[in-house]
Amino acid sequence: MATFVEQVREMGIKQAVITKADEVVERVTAGMTINDIRSALRGDEPRRPNPRLRPHADGFWLHIRPSFYHTGVTHIYPTFRLGWMSTFMLVWETITGLILMVFYTPSPLVAYGNMWNILGNVPLGQLFRNMHRLGAEVMVLVVALHMLRTFVTGSYKKPRQFTWVTGMLLLLFTIFLSFSGYLLPWDQLAYWALTVFISGGAAAPAPDFVNNTILLILQGGPALGANGLLRWYLLHVLLLPLLAGIFFFVHYYKVVLYGISLPPGREEIGEDTAKRVPKDERSYFIPDILTNELMWSALLTLFLVAGALWLWDAPLESHADPVVTPLHVVAPWYLSWSQGWLKLADKTLVVAFIPLLLVAFIVMPYIEVGKSRRYADRRVGLTVAMLFIAFMLVSNWMGSPEFRVASSPDREVSIHMLPEEGPGGLKGIPFEHMTPGNYTPGQEIEGNPFLTRGLEEYEHAMHQQSCTLVGNEMWDECRVETLDSGAKRYSNSFTSDAMPDPFATLEIVEIQPNLKEMVLRYEVVNPENPNELLIDTSWTSFRHADSNYEEECQFLNKPCPID
Amino acid sequence: MASQAVAVQAGSGDASGGISRREFLYYIWGASIALLTLQGAGLLVWFLIPRFREGEFGGTFTLSVDELPDINAEPVNFADGRFWLVNLDSEQPNERMYQAEDEPNPIQGVAAIYKVCTHLGCIYSWTPANNRFECPCHGSKYRLDGRRVESPAPRSLDRFSLQAIAEDETTVLAEAELVDDFFSPLVLPSGTAFVRIDTGNRKDGPTEPLLCDFAGNCP
């Protein structure tokens, strides 16, 4: 081989550089020259011997990828690209997660502060957090749909049973990965979701000392704290990605080994021709599959970036408080079904049922051994699957906020007016318009449209809640009378002469310069003895001049009731 | 090569011809590796059990009797120790505290109730308008003394050990009695100036019927 200097002498500098570049490209691609690449992109027939097969034979990156696919599996149906998308999401989560790790420390002292730093200070920090969180949810969805597809087309049948088993494990790892990341922001949502989840894990049908040990190991102490956060962090960034990575390769090796199963109608019953691809049915990886995958990468990236930018923001509630559980706690949507089950049955039953269900899923391909993958021959199996999906949808719905635990009417009104988390209700009133004083629902304040609007909303919320105490034995009936003046009298918990209800008040106090307190107070008088207060409760919320809730409404893309 | 020759001599190449010494030693070796792995797994569990002092979040609390709530009044919250203090007397019933059909003896005295819901570990709170403890997570409800009103809680609320202490802050005048491995409320003897709550000594609440079953208003 001539050296570069010799080549320059021989063919001139331009030609020598081109030859050198071609050589480098051929080495990097493990066998394709610039002309080979251009011919592949043009769609020409490959020369013989086919250089497009060499990256598969000699290169590291493509040695696990097949050099051609059956044309029967390269369309949207039957794969819907879901397996590939799951892989894409795993890579996506790894990249965005690594970037977020740079700005995160797993300690209760700083974790929450880190989150605000990422949101407000790190360039593109909020975008990366949104993309990571959105990606986590999309990944759970994509992996679940991938399993569903594999079941529906019967692709898990012999010889692909073990591929299905590893797939089930990957689904489990995906859910655990998504959920273990839940704790890291160390906000109220994170803390209480994990507390409930861990307590569930420790409700196994086992002796007490086993459950107590599970609880201690998962919490890292008698309650979630610094040790617990560190444990879940390590699970999230080390153990689970490692397991998911290992099983991904086991899974993909089996996929390549047996080939992607053809659509059920394309082969004879009982045949498996995925690996016997006739010459005219081949779709080569280079360039067709590769460019197709690049297109899907671009589309998914576009969807995730656009979603993270404009459509959805990752939630961040207030700092975790181990002694206060917020009023309306909900499970993440992909665990909503378990929340629904917990309303139906004892927790030990639910906790025992979940692993049984998992085992049932894992052994499914060893039970459904009928040779045919055709839909018409699998009516029982598909019916059972549809019933199961319906059952899960109903369970999910039962676990949704629709069926959240309702508190007493005064708390429900208060939480509507002064939410525990984020902006909304009376928090939308600009600080300078929060004039100290006592106000009643529906009162009109001259020259203060914000407060007037807030009190109007207060009256509306009272209207909605004022008859909800019917179930309370103290007030057996909800009576609404219209007085001569046109005002309405509600005879129950929020008894009053008329709306606006004099027994529900909003009190605004300036307790320090730049710090105001809003108190919603409820007093219920005994109908038999006007001097006796049956209920005397209040709900307090502090508001600093710099809280900027009214601006936050726009920043968080949230609707502000008062504007 | 030599080993193959030995194998051929010993078993004549027939696997059913009994275990050779070499094969036997391999099995023993394999079994010891399996045992070692099991031990390692056991050690890992032991290693993962967190080290902490019992009652780490609280320890022992000594409170003046002035801090106790009135009889059958709303409970008093001690967030540091993660307990509620209640003062009960079912002989003077009100909507917070009363005697249920299956309770033959009056319930009287002071109790320290653990703040954590027995269902899935959330912190329940006192809901004044409904006169009971309510858990925001899955809706368990409890009477003032911690007995279950509504499920899904599997048992009544847990209690801490409680002592009545005299003016000198050392003499223990009385101690909450254990009945069926659960602390009964303690009627404070005269001369009690302080109560001492040991958050390291907690007893699980009993599994009694739901109170809403008696009222017939279970959801």
Image (cartoon, rainbow, N blue to C red):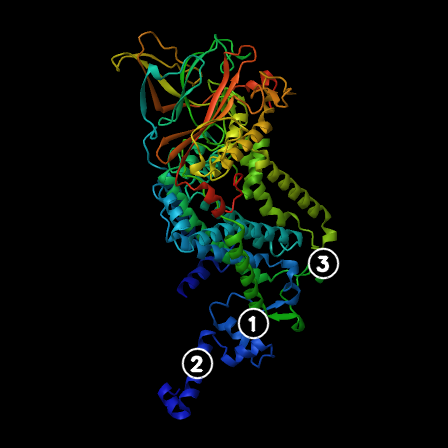
Q: As shown in the figure, which amino acid type bears the numbered disc 3?
A: Ile
Q: Indicate which disc, 2 or 1, sits on the residue closer to the N terminus.
A: 2
Q: Are marks 1 and 3 on the same chain?
A: yes
Q: Nearer the viewer, residue B30 or A204?
A: A204
> Quadrant location of residue B217?
top right
| B44 shown above or below A471 | below
Q: Is residue A138 left or right of residue A234?
A: right
Q: Report the residue marked by disc 2.
A: A21
Q: Residue at x 52, y 71 (%)?
A: A56
**Picture coordinates of residue A90, whole percent (x, y):** 49, 55
Residue mark closest to the camera, 2 vs 1: 2
Residue B163 seen anywhere in this rendered image of the structure: no
| Tag count | 3
Q: CA distance from mark 2 to mark 1?
A: 21 Å
Residues at circles 2 and 1 in contact by the CB criterion of under 8 Å: no
Location of mark 1 (residue): A286
